[in-house]
Image (tube, rainbow, N blue to C red):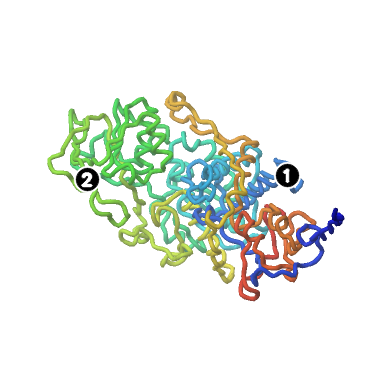
Amino acid sequence: MPIARKEKKKKKDFSQTRGFSGGSSVQTSELRPVFVPKAAPCMTGCPQGQEIRKFMVSLAQGEDYGRSPEETVTAVWEALTERNPFPAVCGRVCPHPCESECNRKEKEGPVSINDLEQFLGDWGLEHGLKLKKADEQTRAEKIAVVGAGPAGLTFAYHLARRGYPVTVFEAFSKPGGMLRYGIPSYRLPESILDAEIRNILDLGIDLKCNTVVGKDVSYDELKSEYAAIFVALGAHKGMKLGLEHEDAPNVWTGTEFLNKVNSGEPPEVGDHVVAIGGGDTAIDTVRLARRLGAKATILYRRSRTEMPAIDEEIEGAEFEGVEFHFLAAPIGVLMADGKASGLRCQRMELGEPDASGRRRPVPVEGSEFDVPCSTIVAAISQEPDFTGLELLREGRDWVKTDDSGKTELEKTWAGGDVINLWLVTGAIFHGRRAAEALHETLQGIESSKPTDPTVVRADKLLLSHYEEKARQEAPELTVEERLATLDAEIRQTLTLDQALAEAKRCMSCGYCFDCGNCWSYCQDNAVVKPLTKGQPYSFKLDFCNGCKKCAEQCPCGYIEMFLPGTGPKSVTEFRPVVGV
């Protein structure tokens, strides 16, 4: 019988454990890891270029840095308002192009950035937080602003916080521009708008309402008294249909109608309001008509797909019982007893795309039909009123500026709808951009344009790392509750717990959020985890064997592999959280 041999014990390979103290002798590639920050798509989708990613991660990780939830939210509000003094407003009225770009949509849905901005704005107002000056200097150069809308007030804010004496001239009796006179209060409560404007004016800005530049004070007077002028007239003049009888007393432009309602003088609309157009003004008009007790109809010459209005607003109108006539255009106003009694319309079909990229509507022969109604609202477009300021207008292009907001006129800058019809957040961007450029001009500061980093898309992320989490949804009013009054706000604000939970859905695309994956998956101790939270990770490249595990397991696409000496330098400064 053969003698059983004692099995030789295998030597343990410590190089495959976290406790191994030296580099691997096996080189799998010559590539080496580099920390390369990238732009999150949400940030590039925001006209303001807000640091959305940093705000989200800050809310999500505040407790990890020893902050209370209250301290965290306050710090994020302060950082957010360094660029945008209207967070509570924008959280309500911005169509959130940032969310359309959010990589999280490839899982269960984008992060609710708008709701979080509204939460932050409301937090600031509820807790009496004040906008801060950038420095304590008092400057001699006086600045004039024409128009107290979002562009004008943002421009005034950014210069006042730098110590400039600023005077704002407003034609209407109250500030706010289209925020006040063009957006219904069920979307933007007057109390919210008033509070954020007051916070801006408290920086020492002088506001002169009921003052029309070009009539009450001349443009030449402003040029002689002020070092610079920012023109932000807005676009309060509604465009006409060009039809006979549209001067009837019950035919309004969209801007006229909204102005009347928001000024507390809603017109008698009767039992059926028809609005012509497919933009937000048309949608706002018919939703107000429902709240005034009337049946409401949208008449639009293209299809539902081509409507430029915000999708959520269209869906809200449908939910509230608004009827839509697509592929139809008015060709005449019907009259009875000195008033408009309806519209004669013609059916359309879509032809080739026009300059906007939408397919051009073409009339269908012999397809006329009538729509009886008691009020007609032409909400097809709007433009600035240049009366007394004709020198500013450059033909159909209104006011032209360079990339900084500077016009060809001496001392004159411009922004907002006076340049082109855009989003509220776009007008805010115009105001900030021009203020920063003017400050640099007045102080002789050389402007430096930062390079745009690469945008990281979902295909560069490790989506499986992120746990699926449902979006936090703020409660909304029922149809009956909405239509009971003119100003009941439809959508409420997230709670503190909801806001923090929603922020944790942010994937921190393109920038480290301290998940530790690179450190955990490296078997050669080539990744150095910082002892102090908030400090950067680093690499010991002499330990690295090029296995690529750190890059493959980095959820946010922050790590890339390069041949030594060919890639960018690794980032050494790490600021994932506001205030760290």
Residue assigned mark 2: 349
Residue placed furthest toward the front = 1
Residue 218, image quadrant: bottom left
Question: Contact (CB < 8 A) between labels 1 and 2?
Answer: no
Give the image location of residue 397, x and y in percent.
34, 59
Marks 1/2: CA distance? 57 Å
Instruction: Between residue 67 and residue 502, name the one nearer to us.
Output: 502
Classify 327 as above or below 294.
Answer: below
Question: Residue at point 19% right, 37% down?
Answer: 333
Question: Residue at point 57% right, 57% down?
Answer: 159
Q: Could you tell me if residue 148 is visible in this image?
A: no
Residue placed furthest toward the left = 366
Residue assigned mark 1: 63
Give the image location of residue 99, x and y in percent.
50, 47
Under circle 1, the secondary element is helix
Disc 2 crowd rating (10 Å Cα; few below 14, some 14-19, many 20+) is some
Amino acid type indicated by mark 2: Glu
Earlier residue among tags 1 and 2:
1
- State which quarter of the image contains the C terminus: bottom right
Amino acid type indicated by mark 1: Glu
Give the image location of residue 365, x and y in percent.
13, 43
Question: Residue at point 44% right, 66% down?
Answer: 402
Disc 1 crowd rating (10 Å Cα; few below 14, some 14-19, many 20+) is few
Q: Could you tell me if residue 63 is visible in this image?
A: yes
Under circle 2, the secondary element is strand
Instruction: Between residue 181 and residue 121, name the one nearer to us.
Output: 121
Looking at the rendered structure, the number of numbered marks drawn on it comes to 2
Residue 535, image quadrant: bottom right
